Image: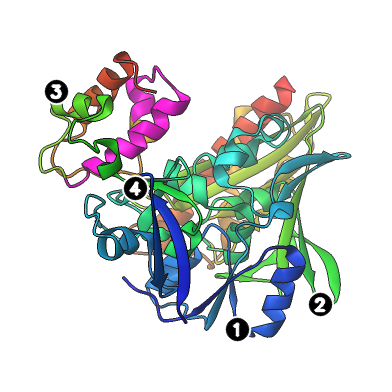
Amino acid sequence: MKLSVSIQVNGRTYDREIEPRLLLVHFLRDSIALTGTKIGCDTSQCGACTVLLDDVAVKACTCLAAQADGCSVTTIEGLAPDGRLNALQEAFWTKHGLQCGFCTPGMIFAAQALLRVNGNPSPEQIRHALEGNLCRCTGYQNIVRSVQAAAAAGVR
Amino acid sequence: MYSADFDYHRARSLADAQRLLAAHPGAKLLAGGHSLIPLMKLRLAAPSAVIDIGRIPELRGISRSGDSIRIGALTTHAELAASADLQKSAAALAEAAGLVGDPAVRSRGTIGGNVAHADPASDLPTVLVALDARITAVGPKGERTISADDFFTGIMTTALADDEVVTAIAVPASVRGQGSAYVKFAHPASRYAVIGAAALVSIANNRCSGARVALGGLLPHASRVRSVEKALTGKPLDAAAIEAAAALAQADLGSNVAGDIYASAEYRTAMAPVYVKRAVAAAAARAGLA
């Protein structure tokens, strides 16, 4: 079976014929060549594939592209369309919230989801909100500092 | 990972979902997808068709109906955790929903999908059994209501028929003198319950006038520990009485406990009374405040 979907990604609409089993993460990476979204564990545990789906942070490895039909997706590419980092990305940059960078797109969206509902999170609340995102480099300390810095800079 | 191939159909209403189920025998229903999609990716499930019920408006939302709280099947864990009504009147359920997976998982996973999937290590079934919840399902023969006690029948097995759709879950709203709580020993990576304990206690004249206590995570399906309930009833809920009653959980578990590479059956059995004790103590504290 082929399925026609229309998914808006970073403000641009993509109409594609897909197999129903195509995952949203593969749609993003393979169908429309936006490889900023990473595939880590592929079992909804590591959070590397986290994107915004209709403004809610979701794991794109556990969502069918068909479920996103007619919806709006934001990927990491959508945050810096002209190559200039947004304030949250800037905070990760200045506070060394990344080393290899593989988890970073997912971390950014998990942090974004937190800051939308809590503009002044405690370190503990940040850790709780990032529970579904694994980082194998930083030991998390600088990621927490990055999110604190973003909050202090007014990111919501 | 790709699942096996399947046909995809999107249901626009409950009637549409039933029509599609009748037309596609062997089809699976898809709501948030956080139980079904992982199973399909691992090829533990390979349905020929998937019917997406995720956009049916009539299956959403939390509302009061008399002395019970009706929760639409598509209500997400995040919505359960954030519901002021549940926090106040079915505290264990809001608490458990807030402990499921992680924020992204809670934003997608639904209560209806959760109960239909019936993962033995899931959180909500344990709470629903303790709270005496009722699950409503609609099939070709009409609507029926199944108590949580009877709904969960085995590992990923329920009383639901293939052609039925879970539409709502109703939990009794707690009254003055009642309190409920859920505590869990979460697996550090998956956040699934290694042990989950839920308790609902009623206090009258400083004594326990009734208790429902359930364990999940270590059994084929969430189940009540009736020896514990019986031992609590009639006692003042002080630390000693709770501890003595909780110890009886081991006898109720018997030889049904499953172990794995992370936690052996012996270890889980030994830890179960500790979590039962914590759940009952937390529920009793809330009952005192109510």
Residue that badge 2 annotates = B140
Residue at figure coordinates x 71%, y 51% from the top left: B72
Asked whether the residues under the numbered discs 3 and 2 touch, taking CB atoms below 8 Å apart as contact, a structural biologist would say no
At numbered mark 3, what does the secondary structure look like: helix, strand or loop? helix
Could you tell me the amino acid type at mark 1? Gly
Q: Which residue occupies the foreground of this view, B101 or A90?
A: A90
Residue B103 percent across, percent down from the top left: 44, 41
Q: In this view, does B80 lie to the left or right of A92?
A: right
Mark 3 chain: A
Q: In this view, does B9 lie above or below A14?
A: below
Question: On residue A94, which mark appears?
Answer: 3
Alpha carbon distance from label 4 to label 2: 39 Å
* Marks 4 and 1 on same chain: no
Q: Which residue occupies the foreground of this view, B86 or A28?
A: A28
Quadrant including the C terminus of chain A? top left
Q: In this view, does A93 lie to the left or right of B251?
A: left
Could you tell me the amino acid type at mark 4? Thr
Residue that badge 4 annotates = A50
Mark 1 chain: B
Quadrant of residue A21 within the rendered picture: bottom left
Question: On residue B26, which mark appears?
Answer: 1
Asked whether the residues under the numbered discs 4 and 2 touch, taking CB atoms below 8 Å apart as contact, a structural biologist would say no
Q: Earlier in the sequence, mark 4 or mark 3?
A: 4
Alpha carbon distance from label 3 to label 1: 53 Å
